Image (cartoon, rainbow, N blue to C red):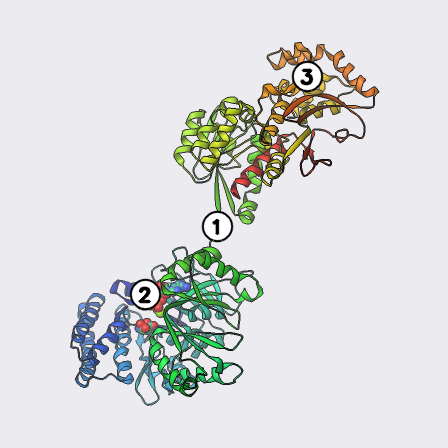
Amino acid sequence: MKVLKFGGSSVASPENIIKIKDIISRYDDRTIIVVSAFGGVTDDLIAAGKLAENQDDSYKKILEKIEIRHLAAIKALLPIEEQSKVLSSVKKELNVLETLLDGAFSIGELTHKLSDKIVSYGELLSSFIISEYLISQGINCAYKDSRDLIITTNRNDRTTVNTEKTTANCRAYFGDSTHEVIVCPGFISKSENGDATTLGRGGSDYTAALYAAAIDAEILEIWTDVSGMYTANPKMVKQAKPIAHISYEEAMELSHFGAKVLYPPTIQPVLSKGISIRIKNTFLPEAEGTLITKSKNEKGKTVRGISHISNMALLSLEGPGMVGIPGISKQFFEVLSQANISVVLITQASSEHSICIGISADDVSKAVAIVNEAFAFQIGRGRIKPVIPETNLAIVALVGDNMKNHQGLSGKMFSTLGRNNVNIRVIAQGASEKNISCVIEEKDVKKALNALHEEFFEENIKQLNLFVMGVGNVGAKFLNQVRQQKKYLKENLKLNIRVIGISNSRTMVFNENGISLKNWETELSNGEQANKSTFFDTVNTLNYRNSIFVDNTASDEVAGTYDMYLGNSISVVTCNKIACSSEYENYSHLKELARTYNAPFLFETNVGAGLPIIDTLKHLIVSGDKILKIQAVLSGSLNFVFNNFNDTTTFHDIVKQAQEEGYTEPDPKIDLSGVDVMRKILILARESGYRLEISDIKNESFLPQESLNTDNNEDFFTSLKKHEADFQKMYNEAATKGAKLKYVAQFEDGKASVGLQQIPKGHDFYNLEGSDNIVLFYTERYPDQPMIIKGAGAGADVTASGIFADIIRIGNF
Ligand code: ADP
Ligand code: ASP
Ligand code: MG
């Protein structure tokens, strides 16, 4: 058997009640249906009772409203021929209700007993109407008054359920019943003397749990107006999400701290029987909802939910007479307990000088009076101060079984609140360490819940939107690296990289959902005709936060568009050296735009490909160091060439190989002539704070003038062939001295030069392998032993990874 409970909003209107029928119809098993009063009716009945007690006859208006609502429901739900019988029964009940209210009105008094009797009508009427409706729909349904089953005991003015009697009654009744569906009112019960009693506001959940436990139900389903128990009250925190699976203890803690979706006493009866609870949404039955079981929550999760209780007050008891005197706190709690005031939170200073407790603000005046009375003797002698109440407060609590195993959660909680200007009055950590709670001002509740929710539940994933121009060697490798790292970056760095635009020299493509990094080649070839200014216009119009323009070309035209991107707050990452080695005016203008528009302009790969040369230089300078001298081998291409060229090879073939393996610029003369190295040392000099132009750099080229004069790759290579003897001579001169040829860049005293040098054995540069680069930074802090950065300084893969690193720098910006 299953027990299903439908709450106030689930039965608030005839349309909703029809939804319930649809839900029940999907079940094959026998079910007990527990229903609440029509949404709002309990509040109306309480209000009517209070008015009557105050001899205000407007209770009649409320009564009238209640009557209209119930009669209308009968008319809407039942076929005409079946209405009159139900209408007359309901009217009869309403007459009794009226008599009760009239009684309270005439004597101006509302006893607890009478009040319980009056509020029971909400559930009595709703359950009766719903059962009649289900019967009229051909369902094999019976109605059973819960007052015949749930028996309460009254102790110290506190109503508790007599579980033994209740269980026996339930087993006898439900065991004998042959009906498919049995509808029962929630919330209401009967005392051992036969008086009407209730189980407390929200108590229908408890009714259902008592039935489930008594009959060992297969499951208890709580059908309500939200899709489960959420990470926070969804009415306060829009981003809250249903928790798929939660333990009994966690659910209990959340409900205890205000998650109204489940009435706190509900869990105990089913917990002891190991019956699962599922919270479901009447208005979205297909939603999974929340499963509450004994088993622990999903591994590794610490904070499972955040809840809050409004309308709280603090009572502080303090004074010198409390120190070291046993029994004061015991007495404090006893007095409150006897007055039926429940204590939600306790903190005690280790000095024992004060105890502070949280109670409902409704109980404050009563609590102050009884506590002061109980401690009158000590107060009179100045040993204890009169109790200090504070109101307009609320409790917010983080809840989770695993919290005890994790340090730093409370620190995170308090710093989050602090950052958001939420003042914390009191902090308490439950002894079970399943919750950390604090008392804040009521006015800050929404802000606090949202800030905490963001901190503990929302993945603050930063979206980086890339617009990539150039998908040759480097660009293609780069896209491939992004594809491989995407998941890692999202999970570990909370960076979500989306490539929205790609262009090569022929076509361009945009996709706001992100271009597939598997299929980008097809998407690109099907794209529109490439156009640099349309590309910029599109990026600018899409106007995404964190847009990054990535230039993987060597084009001066593309470099000429950076100012538009930066000037519109679009970051630029580039391996293209042209902009940074153009006129100083242009370089510094771009840097200025980047600062003004808060758009990073990063070009780490301009020097040493993926090696962190520029970044290191920047760090040295911002931390107050000063560059005295830079010595470097900065051309991976030239290094490759001179490391492989010897008397068994030809210079031409080695340069060709370097070009084919992607170690040179598309135009290899740029490397061989030393222009590329000039650009690099220029950029380093500029980044070191010097205003230098390319024309200031001394370059004694080793290339014959004829090779320098060529204007295409073919002629260039032919000229290399022709001058092979010159190259062999250069090699032999060095080799006979035991030296190696290296193309060295130097910057010192504000002057830069580049040129081929014979490097003797033992020099830092001598053993530079393959296409490696090396940079020696001599600075004020490193005057004799330079800071050295060395490693692969050319190649599409390392260049792509340098671009990637710049993008991640922007992500972490
Ligand atoms: P019912 O009338 O069905 O018993 P309640 O109003 O008692 O429904 O409980 C459902 C309400 O509980 C939700 O509408 C929501 O506003 C509130 N609530 C508070 N905290 C939570 C939470 N953590 N998860 C889900 N609902 C919550
Ligand atoms: N009708 C009662 C209330 O409003 C009980 C319930 O709905 O659970 O508190
Ligand atoms: Mg409820």
Q: Is residue 85 visible?
A: yes
Kindly indicate the quadrant of the structure image that contains residue 13.
bottom left
Name the residue beneath numbered marker 3: 700
From the image, state whether disc 2 or disc 3 is nearer to you.
Answer: 3
Residue drawn where x is 83% and y is 21% of the image: 737
Mark 2 close to ligand 1, CB under 8 Å: no
Name the residue beneath numbered marker 1: 460
Real-space Cα separation, disc 3 to disc 1, in angstroms: 54 Å
The mark nearer the N terminus, 3 or 1, is: 1
Is disc 1 placed on a helix, strand or loop? loop
Real-space Cα separation, disc 2 to disc 1, in angstroms: 39 Å
From the image, state whether disc 2 or disc 1 is nearer to you.
Answer: 1
Real-space Cα separation, disc 2 to disc 3, in angstroms: 90 Å
Asked whether 545 or 765 is in front, the reply is 765
Whether pointer 3 and pointer 1 mark residues with C-beta atoms closer than 8 Å, the reply is no
Q: Position of residue 255 (x, y in %)?
A: 42, 69
Which mark identifies residue 612? none
Amino acid type, residue under disc 1 in the picture? Asn
Name the residue beneath numbered marker 2: 20
Q: Quadrant of ligand 3?
A: bottom left
Neighbour class for label 2 at 10 Å: few (<14), some, many (≥20)?
Answer: many
The mark nearer the N terminus, 2 or 1, is: 2
Asked whether 507 or 549 is in front, the reply is 549
Mark 1 close to ligand 1, CB under 8 Å: no
Amino acid type, residue under disc 2 in the picture? Ile
From the image, state whether disc 3 or disc 1 is nearer to you.
Answer: 3
Q: Position of residue 749 (x, y in %)?
A: 65, 27
